[in-house]
Image: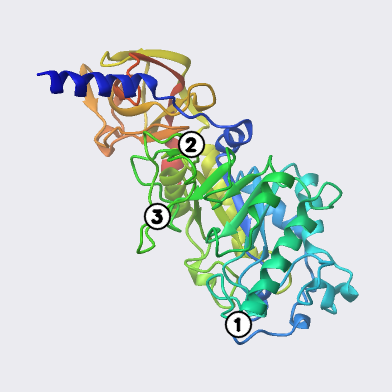
Amino acid sequence: MLKFLLIVWFSISVAEDFKVPKPTTTQAKWLDYEVGAIVHFNMQTFDRYMKPGKVVAADVFNPCELSTDQWVKAAKSFGAKYIVFTIDHFSGFLMWPSKTDYKYSVKYTKWREGKGDVLLDFIKSSKKYGLEHGVFYSVHNNWYMGVDNYTTGDPASQERYQKIVEEQMHELFHAQSLYKDPFYIWFDAGIVPGVSPNVGPTIRDLAKNSLCDECPTFAGDQGLRWVGNENAMAPLPHWYAVPKGKCSMKTNDGQVIQGNPSGELFCPANCDTVIREHFWFWEPDTEYSVKSVCRLVQEYLTSVGHGCTLLLNINPDTRGKVPEQDLSTYEELGRAIELLYKEPVAKYFSQKLHVDKEKKWEFKTFVSLNGSIVIMEDIAKFGQLVRSYELKVKTGDCWISIDEEGSTIGHKRIHPFPRALAEKKISGISLKIRKLVTEQRDITLREVSVYKWDEAAKQNLI
């Protein structure tokens, strides 16, 4: 009996002592942005057969019509609030004229007589059109320097590689740099302590306010991580918290470990995907692979609608411009997303709910081909709290449960109406919070809303 009481006391004590992690101001802003873009444009755009041991000359890079303005406007057309650029991706080719002892960059091309700077142009365009900018840098592969999976296989060249990377990080982010203060830094495939170049101290010293994606041990409180697939799919339940010091985790066989409701560190995941299935860099004759707007809307719902953010790829061609078909699809996607929020039926803010007590909202009866219920936690103020919930819709005199299991909510949870509700009279919704991550008995939600999706349904977008 004593042993049982001690276990109960310990469990209650742990639950009471658990402090729910909350986002930094930058992380909270990133969640609110909901949609971002990533531009894949590097030497692979010009030679898709590049690989370790087969690196083309710097002069192969020659985008005759390059327009970073066009890239950013394309991102803005589908609602992106930030945009990330692959300044170094596998090939080792740099998109800025680095002054380090490194001869594989725009500086060593005929393009703009070696005086061009794609990264600086990109930053200027981002500021011009009001988007936050970020950079993507590959550490684990550099074909120019013979690096494969973080190593060259030779101590001398490994030492030189690590020194070059560390110098480039300082060059990019020091206080007088033209490229300083990015909103977002992403190290492709992450950083492996003791193996990768030691960029952690530099990043946290010079870019301490930047979000750091795949920075497992040095992200501090500004970390982000990859969701583990390239399909814009956030698995449910979807937790933002992770164990302290592990802002990116994988199993021994390389599988990504998802978040943890008991985690001490706030480190949410990004959900990335491509516009052309499945090409990150532009390749000729791949127009057939451009996704339909309907599919992209579904990916919006499985990313943003699951509490994640959507990071959609942009792949300029050898001109340095986004292809027309892609541009058209981005614009249509932007209009489609707007349609999901165009017809609000009811919006309720700062709603206080008690655990295990159903709360009902009734409103003027409407009929719709489709629609949604949107629930938002106040993550910035309280962190992520909801473990499970039950959602119902009132039609006639009946309350119908939403089939999809209510687990996590997070920043935003979008529940499309069940097909059975099409053209039925709807006059209310109810929500019961079943369990929180703490022992508290109430929660204040940021928003509970109901939307009609008539126009989106008529256009076969959902």
Mark 1 or 3: in front is: 3
Checking the image for residue 260, the label placed there is none
Q: Secondary structure at mark 2?
A: strand
Bin the neighbour count of mark 1 within 10 Å (Cα to Cα): few under 14, some 14-19, many 20 and up.
Answer: some
Name the disc covering residue 50, or none.
Answer: 1
Classify mark 2: residues with Cα within 10 Å, few (<14), some (14-19) or many (20+).
many
Tell me, yes or no, if residue 461 can be seen here: no
Amino acid type, mark 3: Val
- As helix, strand or loop, the secondary structure at mark 1 comes to loop
- Residue to which mark 3 is pinned: 256
Crowding around mark 3 (Cα neighbors within 10 Å: few <14, some 14 to 19, many 20+) is some
Residue underneath mark 2: 265
Instruction: Please name the amino acid that badge 2 sits on.
Output: Leu
Q: Quadrant of residue 413?
A: top left
**Gap between marks 2 and 1, in whole Å?**
39 Å
Q: Identify the residue at image location x=58%, y=41%.
A: 220
Q: Is residue 378 above or below residue 370?
A: above
Quarter of the rendering containing residue 136: bottom right
Specify which label sits upstream in the sequence, 2 or 1. 1
Side of 24 relative to 360 (left or right): right
Q: Is residue 439 above or below residue 251?
A: above
SS category of the residue bearing label 3: loop
Q: Can you say whether 305 is above or below 141 in the image? A: above
Residue mark closest to the camera, 2 vs 1: 2
Looking at the rendered structure, the kind of residue marked 1 is Met
Query: Are the residues tagged 1 and 3 within 8 Å (C-beta)?
Result: no
Toward the bottom, the furthest residue is 54
